[in-house]
Image: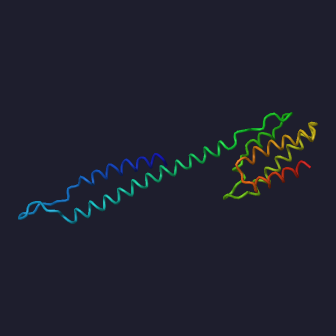
Amino acid sequence: MKIIGYMLVVVGVLLLGFSFLMNTTSYTDGLGRVNDLSLLFSQQNRIIVFCFIILYGVILISKESKLDSKKETLGKMQVNEIKNIGFKSAVISNINNYRSYDFLKNGKLDESRLSSFLIICNELIIEAKNNGLSMDKIESIMNEIIINITEGLNESDTSIIKIEIKKLIQ
């Protein structure tokens, strides 16, 4: 979209320049060269249309830039992964795939995504217990997961996630 925006701006500026250079006079037998109202109106219409083309190109460029900055911000919000948990687990890679923005849908906490995440967390807790990890170690792993997952979420969503994960531990 950004490329299309730049192309629209360039084409619009070129055509706008040609519109300003447009000859708006016509030749008459008795008076010589006179201003032709139809040519003046045609020039005016072209200038207006090409200004809107330039404006649309600028909007496309700025809109794409905002989307890029949002993606960068969301990507930077969570780059930490849980790595050393004390045993080999296939479930931990699934947990590391979740980001805080995965839990939001239209700006609100998505209960279905949270429940699928809690199922994966429960599998991790069961694996940890089967591998002989102490409850203290399991709690510290889950606290680290909570910190990574809730980074960037508002307080109410964070507290809901914390409460649900704490229920799993007990």
Residue plotted at (61% across, 43% down) = 72
Q: Position of residue 99 (x, y in %)?
A: 71, 46
Above or below, comparing residue 28 to residue 57 in the picture: below
In the figure, is residue 134 to the left or right of 144? Answer: right
Q: Quadrant of residue 24?
A: bottom left
Above or below, comparing residue 115 to residue 77 in the picture: below
Residue plotted at (31% across, 58% down) = 47
Residue reaching furthest to the left: 30
Q: Quadrant of residue 130?
A: top right
Give whichever of 151, 131 is nearer the camera.
151
Count up the numbered dots: 0
Residue plotted at (41% across, 55% down) = 55
Q: Position of residue 85 (x, y in %)?
A: 84, 36
Protein image colouring? rainbow
In the figure, is residue 60 to the left or right of 54? Answer: right
In the figure, is residue 14 to the left or right of 141? Answer: left
Q: Position of residue 77 (x, y in %)?
A: 67, 44
Q: Position of residue 57 (x, y in %)?
A: 43, 52
In the figure, is residue 83 to the left or right of 129? Answer: left
